Amino acid sequence: IQKAKRMRWFRPILGLGFVQRRLKAKIEKTVKGPSLNERARSATLVWGEVRNATGQKKVAHLTTSNGYTLTAQAPIAIVKHWLEKGFDQFGSLTPALLMGADFVSSLPGCSAIQIKDADSQSD
């Protein structure tokens, strides 16, 4: 909390154009994402667990393409869907509300979502 309070004094300085440019230039020099080849060879494993009020537990997992690739593929698929089919809902929608709960599984390099009772896990 103390660090957050001190940061409020730096906020106006961090908002200055020349400071932003210097920070962005430093980030571009030091932070590098994976190459196309590295992205093609890697995958992302997603796992989740839910529990209801009675203590029943379910676990789910899926494999997707590399996170960078998935981040590029998903919005393109959503825009294509919107242009081809349109939609009649307004306001903010999650991808699952707009595209369906299994949307991610339809993207290249993504598996189906596997849902199991937590007790039946054998991994």
Image (tube, rainbow, N blue to C red):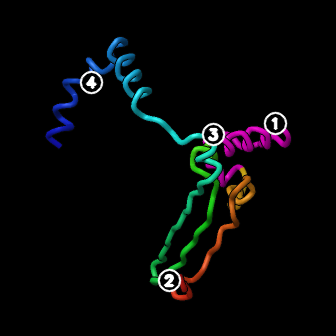
| For discs 2 and 3, the disc positioned in front in the rendered view | 2
Counting residues from the start of the chain, the first of labels 2 and 3 encountered is 2
Counting residues from the start of the chain, the first of labels 4 and 1 encountered is 4
Question: Tag 1: Cα neighbours inside 10 Å, few (<14), some, or many (≥20)?
Answer: few
Image location (x, y in percent) of residue 53: 45, 78
Counting residues from the start of the chain, the first of labels 1 and 3 encountered is 1
Q: Quadrant of residue 103?
A: bottom right
Q: Secondary structure under badge 4?
A: helix
| For discs 1 and 3, the disc positioned in front in the rendered view | 1
Q: Quadrant of residue 102?
A: bottom right
Q: Are marks 2 and 3 in contact (CB under 8 Å)?
A: no
| For discs 2 and 4, the disc positioned in front in the rendered view | 4
Instruction: Determine the CA span between mark 2 and mark 4.
Output: 46 Å
Does the segment drawn in magenta span residue 87? yes
Q: Nearer the viewer, residue 70 or 2?
A: 70
Image location (x, y in percent) of residue 57: 50, 80
Instruction: Determine the CA span between mark 2 and mark 3.
Output: 33 Å
Hey, what amino acid is under mark 2? Gln
Q: What type of secondary structure mainly makes up the magenta span? A: helix
Residue 83: mark: 1
Image location (x, y in percent) of residue 58: 54, 78
Q: Which residue is mark 3?
A: 91
Residue 11: mark: 4
Hey, what amino acid is under mark 3? Gly
Magenta range is 72-98
Image location (x, y in percent) of residue 70: 63, 48
